[in-house]
């Protein structure tokens, strides 16, 4: 019995917190985790509420992915404890008033709790967790090959901003158009999740995310001013305080990251450190950044 | 509304339930059902007017099954949460679009975000269909 737990299981390596300019991105591929005793070990990390939610998922694959998602969040955050080792089991979570999950540090008495923010996103073949300090973070991942059941432009016209529809309609190749649609989706989702106020606070058609002209991999957020929405001329204000990064993960997924730029970081593009993990088994530093 | 929903959805023993309710409701008949004949089908329709018809729930289920590519044997009820069936935000938006097309309605974004189960989707659809001006 002891053999199955200790066999090949390493402890979580402690890590330094990301700097203000950095986002750490951790991801797990469900198809690489098959060992039943490892999954059992993971399930022992979860709170009773989390276990219930896992069980509510319909189907074994969905249950496994839900389990891996909670495992990824708990083990990732536990790595960043600067003072003493933290048992991932002991972490507690709460939601902000709009429902965004946050770490609840109440059970830690010292005041040196890292001002750590996290956000998680999952698809059926990849689960990712982004970590920042001091500033909120939102992430979204999507399979590059994901097929949209509706016509891409019809979908965009219904949900995206006018400028984004314009951008997409200039793309003639349907495959490229579909891919750009998905990239935009991940960027927009990442922003709404970073904002943390729920979707009604930032309906998709009220803001535009576009590539910064003359830069590679840098994106701008622009909002259509609500005041002038009825007039013929729309003024757009571009918001410098949100930074975006768009990456390719595992050759199969797009991942978008959005963080608030609190100016203390000194400006400049976001630095992303990507690691693939199978908690307690292996961690792999993928690359510094692979921006799109 | 909760008790009405339960009544309307529990089709396992419809005749006993309905007759019980009708008996209970008989004292209200002049007020609530006064304008209608007390035929079973019309009263049944009134009683479930606060919760979506089974037919609507079925149509929504079919759309959800298709969007999420669920196998035929996936257990699916009106109370099934989209997230528990594996839907992410993109799926939910596609489901809403498909519902708009199927029922010829327009769903506000704020309403769309509040739909988390098949029942909620069906209720919203019926609400919007009823409010539509006559074509």
Image: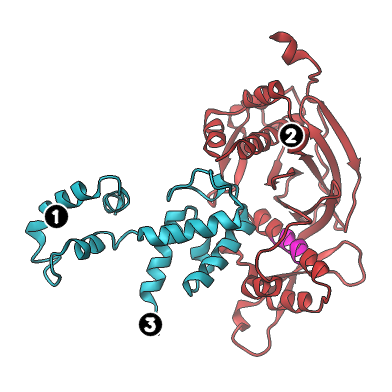
Chain colours: A red, B cyan
Report helix, strand or loop for mark 3.
loop
Q: A47 left or right of A80?
A: left
* Residue A185, placed above or below residue B3: below
Percent position of residue B120, x then y: 43, 57
| Residue ranking furthest to the front | B72
Residue at left offset 83%, top offset 43%: A19
* Residue A6, placed above or below residue A188: above
Front tag of 2 and 3: 3
Q: CA distance from mark 2 to mark 3?
A: 53 Å
Q: A131 left or right of A229?
A: right
Q: Pointer 3 indicates a residue of which chain?
A: B
Q: Nearer the viewer, residue B21 or A246?
A: B21
Local crowd size for mark 2, using a 10 Å CA cut-off: few (<14), some (14–19), many (≥20): many
Q: Which residues are magenta?
A: A181-188
Q: A218 left or right of B2?
A: right
Q: Are marks 1 and 2 in contact (CB under 8 Å)?
A: no
Q: State the residue position of label 1.
A: B22
Q: Quadrant of residue B50?
A: bottom left
Q: Same chain for the residues at labels 2 and 3, yes or no? A: no
**Would residue A135 be visible to someone looking at this image?**
yes
Residue at left offset 60%, top offset 57%: B67
Report the disc number at residue A76: 2
Q: Quadrant of residue B98?
A: bottom right
Residue at left offset 14%, top offset 66%: B33
Q: State the residue position of label 3.
A: B133
């Amino acid at each position: 019995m002891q053999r199955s737990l200790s066999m090949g299981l390493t402890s979580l390596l402690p890590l330094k917190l990301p700097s203000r300019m950095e986002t750490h991105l951790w991801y797990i591929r469900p198809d690489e985790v098959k060992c039943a005793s490892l999954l059992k070990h993971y399930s022992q990390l979860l709170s009773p509420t989390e276990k219930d939610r896992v069980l509510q998922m319909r189907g074994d694959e969905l249950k496994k992915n839900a389990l891996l998602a909670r495992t990824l969040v708990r083990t990732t955050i536990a790595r960043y404890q600067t003072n003493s080792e933290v048992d991932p089991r002991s972490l507690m979570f709460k939601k902000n008033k709009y429902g965004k999950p946050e770490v609840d540090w109440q059970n830690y008495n010292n005041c040196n709790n890292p001002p750590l923010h996290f956000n998680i996103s999952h698809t059926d073949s990849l689960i990712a967790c982004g970590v920042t300090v001091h500033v909120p973070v939102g992430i979204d991942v999507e399979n590059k090959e994901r097929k949209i059941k509706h016509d891409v432009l019809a979908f965009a016209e219904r949900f995206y901003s006018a400028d984004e529809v314009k951008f997409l309609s200039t793309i003639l190749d349907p495959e490229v158009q579909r891919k750009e649609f998905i990239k935009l989706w991940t960027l927009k989702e990442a922003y709404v999740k970073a904002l943390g106020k729920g979707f009604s606070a930032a309906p998709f058609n009220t803001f535009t995310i576009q590539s910064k002209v003359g830069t590679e991999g840098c994106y701008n957020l622009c909002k259509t001013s609500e005041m002038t929405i009825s007039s013929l001329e729309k003024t757009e204000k571009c918001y410098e305080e949100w930074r975006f990064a768009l990456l390719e993960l595992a050759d199969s997924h797009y991942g978008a990251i959005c963080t608030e730029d609190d100016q203390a970081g000194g400006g400049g593009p976001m630095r992303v450190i990507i690691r693939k993990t199978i908690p307690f088994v292996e961690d792999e530093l993928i690359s510094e950044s692979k921006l799109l | 509304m909760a008790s009405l929903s339960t009544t309307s959805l529990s089709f396992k023993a419809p005749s006993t339930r309905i007759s019980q309710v009708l008996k209970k409701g008989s004292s209200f008949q002049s007020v609530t059902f006064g304008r209608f004949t007390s035929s079973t089908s019309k009263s049944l329709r009134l009683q479930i007017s606060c919760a979506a018809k089974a037919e609507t729930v079925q149509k929504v289920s079919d759309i959800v099954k298709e969007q999420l590519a669920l196998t035929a044997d996936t257990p699916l009820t009106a109370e099934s949460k989209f997230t528990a069936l594996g839907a992410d935000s993109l799926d939910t938006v596609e489901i809403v679009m498909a519902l708009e097309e199927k029922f010829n309605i327009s769903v506000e974004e704020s309403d769309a975000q509040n739909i988390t189960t098949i029942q909620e989707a069906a209720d919203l659809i019926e609400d919007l269909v009823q409010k539509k001006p006559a074509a």
